[in-house]
Image: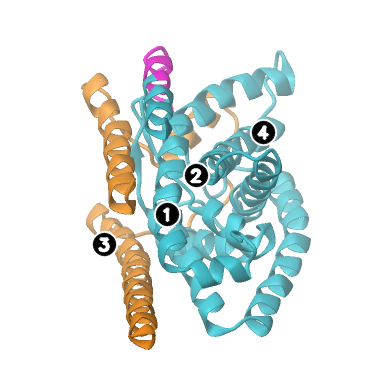
Amino acid sequence: MSLAGKNLIILALILIVTITPLIIKPDAEFGGADGAAGELITKMNPNYQSWFSHIWEPPSGEIESLLFALQAALGAGFLGYYIGAKRTETKYKEEMEQDEKC
Amino acid sequence: MGRKNYWLVSVGIVLVSLFLPENAYAMHIAEGFLPAKWAGIWWVLMLPFLTLGIKHVKRVVDEHDPSIKMLLALAGAFIFVLSSLKLPSVTGSTSHPTGIGLGAILFGPWPMVVLGCIVLIFQAVLLAHGGLTTLGANVFSMAIVGPFVAYGIYKLFRKLGAPLWLTVFLAAALGNLLTYVMTAIQLSLAFPAETGGFIASLTKFMGVFAITQVPLAITEGLVTVLIFNLLREYSKGELKKLSIIS
């Protein structure tokens, strides 16, 4: 199977695994903050006090998502650059090899 | 054949997950949520790994040509992207993949300690996600247990002669899953239940932390196979130099 074909199947599977929870749990909150994990600890150990708080917190959910998007953009930008550069490199190498044969 | 397996695995996972508890959360351990003693212990355990990891990164940078350095940067970028994606899980909460497996397969576990640590510091300082007091524990689970498990699985399945895509999938997925099993162990050690102690806590935290992670482990495995397929096509030279393919 071609590379694109394989990767299309993988992409479809990723979409299925990601979207399924949203469909089978329509009423779930899908929260995931660290604070929620903390809630469980507090529930199990009512006496436990968090003894250190964050040195800086994003002032709002919007700023937090800005920083998360920045993190993803930096990573994805480099991934795209790398694959693009390598793809072009491979293509030119193959063309040069063919030219040499002629 | 490969396609059939993928379907079987994903259908199986969906079926299993339908019966899992709701309202579970899985993430790094939050700031201040490990008692000082345990926060300190994990810091002390983590530091030798980090020191050796830095040495290994230096070695990769010194000994290899720029194309391999670019590949190391790619492994770092992959961690950046994946750990920023909070994905929904069948338990009705969200968590994120780690992206550690790819680099562990390419460069071995040591350089990943450093890359994972950088991402965790970024998230602890700028995103109030994880924390500095709990950095030791979080580095230990995500950037030490994760890559060592991924690398071990990779080596094992290569030796057994499993297909490369399956090997990569299992290495990345299990590295991810065991990261959060480790998180559950860390929390259970710090917060043993009054009745039942460590084991009782572990059962509880495992239900909460590890199960949410199962579908995300699958996603991480799939994404890693995807990018690995691209590398196999366009970075043959580099993969040969790193003895990943012959």
Q: Mark 3 points at which residue?
A: A66
Labels 2 and 1: the sequence-earlier one: 2
Determine the residue located farthest toward the front in the rendered image: A102
The tag on residue B185 is 4
In this view, the residue in front, B85 or B239, is: B239
Labels 4 and 2: the sequence-earlier one: 2
Q: Element type at marker 2?
A: helix
Q: Mark 2 points at which residue?
A: B165
Q: Is residue A99 left or right of residue A43?
A: left
Q: Is residue B231 above or below residue B67?
A: above
Query: Crowding near pointer 4: few (<14 within 10 Å), some, many (20+)?
Result: many
Mark 2 and mark 1: span between their CA atoms?
A: 8 Å
Q: Are marks 4 and 3 in contact (CB under 8 Å)?
A: no
The chain holding disc 3 is A
Q: In this view, does B191 lie above or below B183?
A: above
The answer to whether residue A56 of the structure is visible from this angle is: no
Q: What residue type is labelled 4?
A: Ile
The tag on residue B229 is 1
Q: Do the residues labelled 2 and 1 touch (CB within 8 Å)?
A: yes
Q: Element type at marker 1?
A: helix
Percent position of residue A30, x then y:
30, 32
Percent position of residue B150, x then y:
62, 46
Chain in cyan colour: B
Q: Give the range drawn in magenta.
A: B12-24
Residue A59 highlighted magenta (yes or no): no
Query: Crowding near pointer 3: few (<14 within 10 Å), some, many (20+)?
Result: some
Q: Give chain A's shade.
A: orange
Mark 3 and mark 1: span between their CA atoms?
A: 31 Å
Mark 4 and mark 1: span between their CA atoms?
A: 34 Å
